[in-house]
Image (spheres, grey):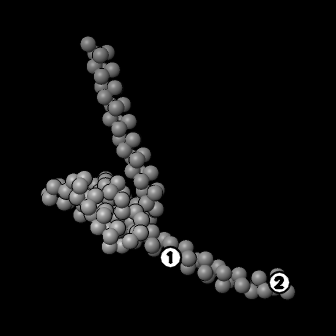
Amino acid sequence: MNDLTTNNFDSILSLIQSTKDRIIKTVNTEIIDLYWQIGKEVSEKAKDGGWGKSVVEELSNQIAANFGNLRGFSPQNIWRMKQFYETYKDSQILSTLLREISWSNNLLVMSRTVMFLIFSIYRNRIMNHHYKKQLF
């Protein structure tokens, strides 16, 4: 009887799991979009309005005061939101695709992108220096 009952529930359990997965994806996309918008605003205000460390700390404090124990809005994470926006703002394709992955994976992508760029610059400088030495 137990196997018969379990088999009868499989389709409903599958529906619940499928809906749960879609909800998580939707929430993640909304969070990434929120972080993008915050990053954009902080970037523009840092450039135009002189926002700096103390202003971002105050913003973090205001978020905590208004939304209680809402996580993800430390000063460091707000600066990461700014970096996220500035890193991908000129690439419509990437900025769209990156909204499909989690924030922690976005941070990993950004850190590896930055490390790759640093490595590429360093490698090019070494190669240019090496070739110049060989020419003279």
Q: Quadrant of the C terminus?
A: top left
Residue neighbourhood size for the residue with mark 1, other residues' Cα within 10 Å, grouped as few (<14), some (14–19), many (≥20): few
Seen in the image, is 87 located left or right of residue 105?
Answer: left
Disc 1 and disc 2: Cα gap in Å? 30 Å
Q: Nearer the viewer, residue 121 or 45?
A: 45
Seen in the image, is 78 located left or right of residue 69?
Answer: left
Image quadrant in which you'd find residue 84: bottom left
Q: Nearer the viewer, residue 71 or 99?
A: 71
Q: Quadrant of the N terminus?
A: bottom right
Residue 11 locus on image (x, y percent): 68, 83
What residue lies at 40% left-to-right and 47% top-to-bottom? 111
Residue neighbourhood size for the residue with mark 2, other residues' Cα within 10 Å, grouped as few (<14), some (14–19), many (≥20): few
Whether residues under marks 1 and 2 lie with C-beta atoms below 8 angstroms apart, the answer is no
Residue type marked 1: Ile
Numbered circle sitting on residue 2: 2
SS of the residue at dot 1? helix
The residue singled out by tag 1 in the image is 23
What residue lies at 36% left-to-right and 62% top-to-bottom? 73
